[in-house]
Amino acid sequence: MLELYQAEGCPHSESVREKLTELGLSYVVHNPRTPDDEVCNERTNAILEQVGGEAQIPYLVDSGREEAMYVSDAIVDYLEAHYA
């Protein structure tokens, strides 16, 4: 399962969502923060920090491949390499 921690309106998150859509991948989206870095969901933000170690977005978790990563360019490259 693919899970994306992201923010609506964040251009970095948008590039990851566009790649997921382009590849026809299903994923679960979590919105812990706003594009201005304000916490909008305390519980989801706490999970992001616990799972990833940082409160940075976008953050992709690929439980099927046991991979997780930050940084939109790295995420897009990963998706291309493993799902294209």
Image: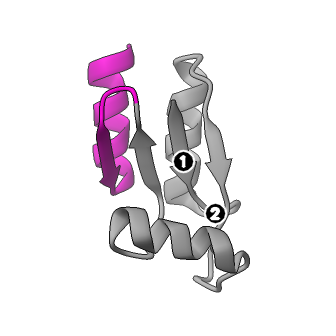
Q: Residue at x 31, y 51 (%)?
A: 69
Q: Nearer the viewer, residue 76 or 32?
A: 32
**Disc 1 on helix, strand or loop?**
strand
Q: Separation of disc 1 and disc 2 at Cα?
A: 9 Å
In the picture, the disc for residue 4 is 1
| Amino acid on which disc 2 is placed | Ala
Q: Which residue is mark 2?
A: 7
Q: Which residues are magenta?
A: 64-84
Give the x, y percent position of residue 48: 49, 66
Q: Is residue 34 visible?
A: no
Q: Nearer the viewer, residue 82 or 44?
A: 44
- Image position of 10 with respect to 20: above or below: below
Q: Residue at x 63, y 68 (%)?
A: 44
Residue 54 is covered by the magenta coloring: no
Residue 67 is covered by the magenta coloring: yes
| Amino acid on which disc 1 is placed | Leu
